[in-house]
Image: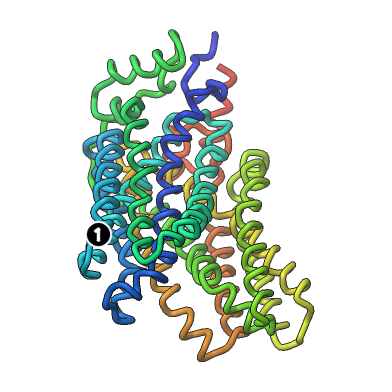
Amino acid sequence: MNKVRTMEDMPLSGFHFKMFTYTSGSTFLDGYILGIIAVALSVMQTQLDMSLTVMGLLGTATLVGMFFGGIIGGYLTDLIGRKTIFLLDMLVITIASVLQFYVNDPIYLIILRFILGVAVGADYPIAGTLMAEFSPKKNRGALIGGLSALWYTGYAFSFLIGYFLLSIGDTSWRWMLLSSAIPSFLLLIARLNMPESPRWLANKGREKEANAIVQKIFGAGVVMSEEPEIKDKTSFLDMFRNGYGKWTLFVAVFWSLQVVPTFAIGTYIPVILGQFGFADGKSEYLGSAIINIVYLAGLIPALYLIEKYGRRPTLIWPFLVSSITLFVLGATSGANLSFVFILVLFIIYGTFNTGMGIHQWVYPTELFPTHIRGTAVGFGTGVSRIASAIGTFLFPAFLANYGVAMTMYVCGALFFVGFLVSLFMAPETKNMSLTETSALNKFGNLKTRDFESNQNIN
């Protein structure tokens, strides 16, 4: 008997890369919008009357907005559709970006930055969810994980654009904040041509539309999946019911444990290198640049390894290596070691840490069924952003009060807890269909593997 061809069995094609372009705009804009405010603030503070509290609120308003946007947007994308919310939030980002150009009161700017955060946070769960629901199962991890590379691209690009716009003068901050309207508007136009998720349509009882989309993209005879999509009503609390609570806990915990040290160390890396004795006016900035470049480079092998060896090992062991590296940095902080040695340790940490960051996208999209997939990704996004905001806010005071050694020990301890959580909770989802991965809460890895083997035999 011939095996049924499903869209998850299809090889990589131009369509998949087109979907990657649509969805990666979410991470690019997140990095860009968070980065451009840092450059704009350096000019803005001389133009507007701002207290330190107001400046702090401007810096964190977007992250707080992402908490609400991730949770609300994730639920709405499961309730009323992936494409609908994907278009609406990009429209909001475009309008809010334009309005930033005209503000004269920093309070209004804080409100707009919060709205931007809500819209970006809403876009996040849709991006990973859509990419997962269209991806071949053999390439799903790399395609979803690859979305994280665009965050670093957007963040770096914002500083480049900000640097060139500084030549405008006193009003340059307005043009910097306005600049995010360009990529958001282009994405809005591009997304008009993208299809709705067939899995979401089938889950809502619209199988005819779902099959029409699958066959238009992949050709006649290709079906959405071998198993019919279960028609469940979207409920926010379903993340915590029917065995999915453990996955919700796992995603929220490992994601937060990974981003808290990452955001804190990444934000203050020049200060940290200065504490190691390299504050000569240029070494700490040279080191920061090299480390951030390696952050992006660390993703390249991870995208291969996650498909070659699976999800579990590429999450568990990087947590452990990152932890050990930070413990070593803490232990050697007062030893007056060479700049190169310290830099190498940070590069090892950055490579492994950034590589495992792709699991923030992979696991949430694979472990939950269609009717709550966006909700779960949004919840993980919201919790991790609040955790990263708190960690980044507290980091300077902790570093000043307790020193670089204790700071490295605490960050290393957080990664070690992440190692333990992943060791005992992380499932393996390599080469499984979304139907199988979202059933792991019921059947466990062994039974799902047996199911897959029986399907291949038949």
Label 1, secondary structure: give it.
helix
Left or right position of 3 against 76: right
- Which amino acid lies under the numbered mark 1 shown in the image of this protein? Leu
**In this rendering, does residue 317 appear at all?**
no
Q: Considering only vertical position in the picture, is 123 above or below 32?
A: above
Q: Considering only vertical position in the picture, is 158 above or below 169?
A: above
Q: Considering only vertical position in the picture, is 327 above or below 69?
A: below
| Number of callouts | 1
Q: Position of residue 100 (x, y in %)?
A: 27, 57
Residue placed most toward the observer, 117 or 196: 117
Left or right position of 336 against 253: right
**In this rendering, does residue 262 appear at all?**
yes
Residue at coordinates 67% horizontally, 62% vertically from top-left? Answer: 290
Residue at coordinates 41% horizontally, 53% vertically from top-left? Answer: 30
Residue placed most toward the observer, 332 or 292: 292
Badge 1 density bin: few <14, some 14–19, many ≥20, Cα 10 Å? many
Q: Quadrant of the image for the C terminus?
A: top right
Q: What residue does disc 1 label?
A: 112
Q: Position of residue 444 (x, y in %)?
A: 49, 43
Q: Position of residue 108 (x, y in %)?
A: 20, 65
Q: Position of residue 131 (x, y in %)?
A: 44, 35
